[in-house]
Image (cartoon, rainbow, N blue to C red):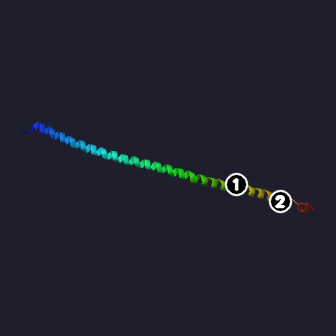
Amino acid sequence: MSPSPEAEARLAALEAEGEELDTALDSIEVRLLGNQAMLQTWQELGRRHQEVTQLHCQTSDAHLVAMMKHYNKQEEKGRQLRRRRSGVAAVDSTVLTSGKASKRRNN
């Protein structure tokens, strides 16, 4: 006994629909695997970023301390230089206003 033409048409339609569903499922599987790989990549990048941030904080702390020491040293040099200059100005004014120079002008 052979199936009726309507049954054969229905069977062919179901087989075609099954193939379309298989193709759609394959496409979804590919997308899911791609998204899973992308998620793993982002997680790895996040982990590496955390490590780099931690390392940067450790090294920048020592660098910042060294910069502050240098800054304080330069400030102290500037203070000493200003003290010397103000001391030289006081000595110069004493020398310039000696009694000999004023007697000559008055005579």
Q: Earlier in the sequence, mark 1 or mark 2?
A: 1
Mark 2 neighbour density, 10 Å: few (under 14) some (14–19) many (20 or more): few
User: Residue 73 at what x, y percent from top left?
Assistant: 69, 56
Q: Mark 1 sits on what residue?
A: 75
Farthest residue to the right: give it: 107
Q: Is residue 36 left or right of residue 68?
A: left
Residue 10 lies in what quarter of the image? top left
Describe the element under mark 1 as helix, strand or loop.
helix
Residue at the image point whose x is 29% and y is 45% from the top: 27
5 shown above or below 104: above
Quadrant, the C terminus? bottom right
Front-most of residues 9 and 40: 40
Residue at the image point whose x is 52% and y is 50% from the top: 53
User: Residue 84 at what x, y percent from top left?
Assistant: 77, 58
Q: Is residue 42 left or right of residue 60?
A: left
What amino acid type should be assigned to the residue bearing mark 1? Glu
Q: Mark 2 sits on what residue?
A: 91
User: Residue 66 at what x, y percent from top left?
Assistant: 63, 55
